[in-house]
Amino acid sequence: MSTDSVTDAQATTAFSAWREELGSAALVGTGRRQVPPPPAALGVAPPEGRGREALLLDLAAFDDVVRRADQRVGAAEPLEPAAPETRPDASPQAVRVLQELLGEGKSERIPRDSVADLVEAWLELADARGVVVPFRLLPGLIRFQGVSRPLGPQLAWGERGRWLRPRSDDEVLLDGLGDASVDELVRGLKDLTPTGAGDAMLRLSDAEPAAVVGAIRTVWSTLSADTRTRILPRLPVAAADSEEGRGAVDPLAEEFLEACLDDRAAGVRAQARHVLTKLPDSRFAARMAARLRPLIVVEGGLLRQTRVSVRLPDVIDDEAERDGMPEQSGGRGHDLEAWLDRILRAAPLSVWTDVVPGRLERIAPLLVEQLPRGRGMEVIAAVRGQHATDWARALLASGGSPELLSLVPPAERERFAVERLRRKTATTDVPGYELVETPGPWSTELGELALAAAIPAPPQPEQADGRRVQQPSRRWLVSRPLLGRRLPATVEPRMRELIMSTRVDTAYDAFRRVLVAELRRRDLAAAVSEAFA
């Protein structure tokens, strides 16, 4: 070994030891430990006349310079140039509209999500017409996507756009899978992030559950706990003859989910229980039904009003912990209150109609009315989890449970929302389920009622005693401006009238700004359509 190589090795060793001492001095403090001078092998000396604190900072900077100087530029593979463009640019009118949209994204006068939707609509129309974004607008489009969401379709970006556009590793891998078979796609899950694996599972939503489960079993042990947790909610589990997720569960899928109840990862076990809770014909549901049935107490009968209650469980079966029955905090035995909540949420709803006399239209509201509020909410959660449309209709018909609106068709949701707004029982200060769950465009009747409910209450006059005046709360349109898209065109004249109001106060100014932004969004949407007409 040469003298130079030994000297280099010694200098490297000395430098590493010095760095550790320097780090210790920084950690402990210069008041308790001396600042170590650089090793003599480096041929440098610390500056004189510096205090300990300043010297520590000087040597930390020196350490950074030495480490950076030791780094060498590697050889990079040259990038392939973009392919020649095969599509023409969009028309000048369409280009002007896109420029305007990207400018709106900077101004933030319109909610960014609304602008992103308009840009995406522009790209979709461009793709349908076989044209692309001009290259001079690509930097602005890429910057906009960087603060928005991935925008497609890719063909409208053009060859240079696809070449420049930032793409995540997941996007590249998923594009590479293309029209891959079930086995090929599942084998690729291990190379994706947990989020990417969940997105990949969406491609298998229409596949045969047995084929998907069989493929996943072969790679299950190679996947991380996070990936396994993301996969389970998107696993196709319904048997071929089931009705919209409420019928029979595929036997192989159920067997796989039951095995996941014993997974070493708590998140996987929780997701398996969550999926099984939505399957009222599963073995898991049968176990929950067996736990609930003896807890239901029915009093009365046909000649006098039926009273329904539930008592706490007093029997702890062997599979309870596996099925997710929680213990009290601190391990102080079993939490029977939490057990009952879990049973009510997970047991199939058919238990109630088997035990409580009467028709469903009577039983459903009876439970929510007579059970303590927390217990009634668990029943409502079971209705949502099991997608029980018949139960949702029964509860909505009684005038309550708007959180179940997503289970019924849009026309029924709108009728419910109109009735609630007429009776002024809808939640309008913060947008309630009546408006959130009713898709647009709304009818003129609902639009007029909703717009009227969005007008802020006038501020209260100053009180004589000087007490602080309560400010009016924000109404639904200010809280959730994106819902303004659902207002029908027939109420636009009324929106303009409200904008021109002479009223001046903080709450109304916020309301006015939302109306102005929504009308501006509609003008831009019309311009996008006209540009490609």
Image: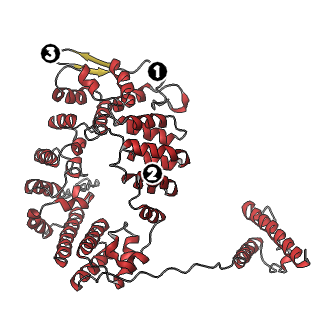
How packed is label 3: few (under 14 Cα within 10 Å), some, or many (20 or more)? few
Which quarter of the picture shows residue 499?
bottom left
Mark 1 vs mark 3, foreground winner is 1
Query: As shown in the figure, which amino acid type bears the numbered disc 3?
Result: Leu
Gap between marks 3 and 2, in whole Å?
A: 58 Å
Query: Could you tell me if residue 109 is visible in this image?
Result: no
x%, y% of residue 413?
16, 46
Marks 3 and 2, the one that precedes in the sequence: 2
Q: Secondary structure at mark 3?
A: loop
- Residue 183, numbered label: 2
Which quarter of the picture shows residue 304?
top left
Gap between marks 1 and 3, in whole Å?
A: 35 Å
Front residue of this view, candidates 137 and 170: 170
* Pointer 3 residue: 302
Q: Residue at x 81, y 79 (%)?
A: 49
Q: Residue at x 44, y 57 (%)?
A: 196
**Quadrant (top left/top right/bottom left/bottom right) for the C terminus:** bottom left
Report whether 480 appears left or right of 324: left
- Residue 460, numbered label: none
Marks 1 and 2, the one that precedes in the sequence: 2
- Residue 317, numbered label: 1
Query: Could you tell me if residue 209 is visible in this image?
Result: yes
Query: As shown in the figure, which amino acid type bears the numbered disc 1?
Result: Asp
Q: Is residue 529 above or below residue 455?
A: below
